[in-house]
Image (spheres, rainbow, N blue to C red):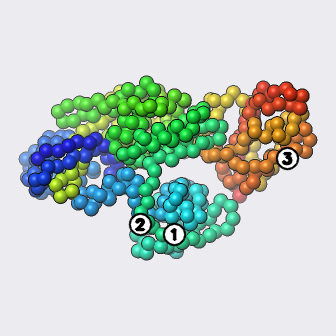
Amino acid sequence: MTYKNKVIALLAPLSLAFSIFTPTTEAADDDEIKKIIQKNYVDELDEETLNQDVSTILKGLDPYSTYYTKEEFQSFKDSLNQKMVGIGVSLAKEQDSIILQKVFPDTPASEAGLTSGDVLISVDSTQVADKSVSETIELLKEIQSSTFDVTVQPAEGKQKTVSVTRKDIQLPSITSERLGGDIGYLQIHTFAENTGKELQEAASKYEDMEHWILDVQNNPGGYVSAAQEVVGAFPNVPTAFIAEYRDSTVTFAALQQDKQLTEPISLLINKNSASASEIVAGALQDNDAATLYGETTYGKGLLQDLMVLPDQSALKLTTARFFTPKHNVIQSEGIKPDIKTDEPLTEAHLDALNEQYSYQTFDEDTVSASKTFEINVSMATSKEAILDSIHLFELGNKEVDFTLTSSDNNTFLLDPTENLQAGKEYMLMIHPGWKSNEGIASEQGVMQPIDIKEA
């Protein structure tokens, strides 16, 4: 039996890394599958093991080697490439609440009026406050009716209940945003077939970024080639990872990309960043190409080959152990952050601002959510002259809309159009360059950190 090879890396049930092989037309029975296992498994197997049935052999190898039926294999590929039946949200646990961390555009959730930051109260009349993220996801999957009610508490206003209908959706593997202070944010949800291309497109949307924040938190992995392409977007990172097979060691190079991320980089990781995510984290850390924020990653350093059988079922088999370019161990160890923090996005954004702007920074001010900010300037100026220099944004998020009024030529009142969110951190920034009534340009920028009181 002969196969064609396509390398990928992924986490299953939490992480996996593998190659896809396409078979010839002859059938693959248990004896044939045993031969594949005997020839390709990362460790040599004894006769006693190989004399067992295939199911028993696979159960005894490692957590990642398994067999997929044709239907299971298709579902697995769809999940990897962000094709699924769902409503189009990602969830997070914050304190005692399930939060809609992201509501993807053009999905049932967005069409029903759900927004990122909404607190999920109930799904089909079942309360979710005491559930984990995984339990809530299972609840969303197991509801028998495709149309059901979801109750949320928006950041502003009263609770609301909306009807959503599960449908086939295609989610992007990367979402991007311009954060306050011209910081680019790229969240890689999975390493799918098109992730390299999506990264190029997302980065090209923002040509004037001062800093990039890449986020692989909760990213279970994906195609090895996608991880190589992501690593290849960073200058001076030649190697993605090293794989040790039973009889050979292979160095996997970064696949160089046209669009290079030459600006300073922060990478966000957590305990659920696995496999291909750890390939990227290890490569960037080994080459001092990024500062890593968060917590130690999952620690999945086993590479699988996914062998497609003639009936379109598949065998997923561990064939190698992989390491960072400096040969640091990933399996059971993970990648440790440079900066350990429970709020990686907030801290990375704040550090990026401090690194990029040599502005006068005041002590943090704690205010109420409905605060109107008074801005006093030393040179008399007009609202029109200073407006474009003033920016208010949540750390880890985009800019906040506001109105600006003047009480005199040295005093301005900034009023956010909506109340700020309790418990969140914000930054009020005034760039230099605005001109006084006499035409004198300001020379000093200002940053005022803001903490919003809990309600």
Residue sitting at x 47%, y 73%: 147
Number of on-image labels: 3
Residue sitting at x 41%, y 27%: 237
| Viewer-nearest residue: 231 or 394 | 231
Instruction: Give the secondary structure at mark 3.
Output: strand
In contact (CB < 8 Å): disc 3 and disc 1: no
Q: Quadrant of residue 94?
A: bottom right
Q: Is residue 308 left or right of residue 289?
A: left
Q: Quadrant of residue 169?
A: bottom left
Sequence-wise first label, 3 or 1:
1
Label 3 sits on residue: 405
Label 2 sits on residue: 141
Q: Is residue 94 left or right of residue 15?
A: right
- Residue 320: percent from the left, percent from the top? 24, 39
- Residue 82: percent from the left, percent from the top? 40, 54
Sequence-wise first label, 1 or 2:
2
**Amino acid marked by disc 3:** Thr
- Residue 54: percent from the left, percent from the top? 14, 55
Numbered mark located on residue 164 in the image: 1
- Residue 383: percent from the left, percent from the top? 84, 41
Residue sitting at x 51%, y 28%: 262
